[in-house]
């Protein structure tokens, strides 16, 4: 928005376009990836750990938001138009993690807890395969 207002060859449509783009981003994020950080921990952690896990993920989420807010302006002045590349790298790492998590659709919380229980007891990563996908589907 600031860039559109500072532009010397500004057209009347630039500022409204930027405002509409920001509103669309907020709307689509709110119905897309936005709620994932709030919903996923409730499905992945056992009942006795769920409250602590959700509290931890909430703190990490807000700390990450703070870090992004604090880092963006220095990155923008240092990297210029490439300032989004570090954030794109973090997004790519997050997508890799997301695709390594097991599908929980159609499973009860007890089934999900039973699936992760042996892995958590032995100290394995929750994203490492414990049983074949066919066995998970057949359970």
Image: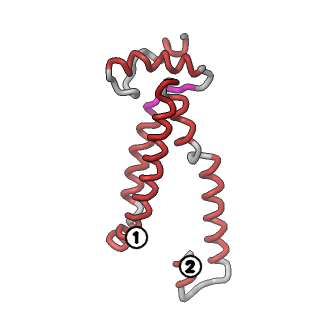
**Residue 96 picture quarter:** top left
Sooner in the amino-acid sequence: mark 2 or mark 1:
2
Query: x%, y% of residue 74?
Result: 35, 70
| Dominant secondary-structure state across the stretch colored magenta | loop
Query: x%, y% of residue 50?
Result: 50, 30
Residue at horizontal 62 percent and vertical 57 percent from the top: 26
> The N terminus lies in which quarter of the figure?
bottom right
Q: Secondary structure at mark 2?
A: helix
Residue at horizontal 42 percent and vertical 37 percent from the top: 97
Residue at horizontal 41 percent and vertical 46 percent from the top: 92
Kindly identify which residue carries mark 2.
4
Q: Which mark is residue 88?
A: none
Judge the density around disc 2: few (<14), some (14-19), many (≥20) Cα neighbours within 10 Å.
Answer: some
Q: Marks 2 and 1, Cα distance to the nearest angstrom?
A: 17 Å
Residue at horizontal 65 percent and vertical 55 percent from the top: 27
Answer whether residue 73 is magenta in the image: no
Q: Which mark is residue 73?
A: 1
Query: x%, y% of residue 93?
Result: 39, 44
Q: Look at the picture and state if 31 lies above or below 80.
A: above
Q: Look at the picture and state if 53 lies above or below 71.
A: above
Q: Which residues are magenta?
A: 100-104
Q: Nearer the viewer, residue 57 or 2?
A: 57
Q: Secondary structure at mark 1?
A: helix
Q: Look at the picture and state if 110 lies above or below 52.
A: above
């Amino acid at each position: 928005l600031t860039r559109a207002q500072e532009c010397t060859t500004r057209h009347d449509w630039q500022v409204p376009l930027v405002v509409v783009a920001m509103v669309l981003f907020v709307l689509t994020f709110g119905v897309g990836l936005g709620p994932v950080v709030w919903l996923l921990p409730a499905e992945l952690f056992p009942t006795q750990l769920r409250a602590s896990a959700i509290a931890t993920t909430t703190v990490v989420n807000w700390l990450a938001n703070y870090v992004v807010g604090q880092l963006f302006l220095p990155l923008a002045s240092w990297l210029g138009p490439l300032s989004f590349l570090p954030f794109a790298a973090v997004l790519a790492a997050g997508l890799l993690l997301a695709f390594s998590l097991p599908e929980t659709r159609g499973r009860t919380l007890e089934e999900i807890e039973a699936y992760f229980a042996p892995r958590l007891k032995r100290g394995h990563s929750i994203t490492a395969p414990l049983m074949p996908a066919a066995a998970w589907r057949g359970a």
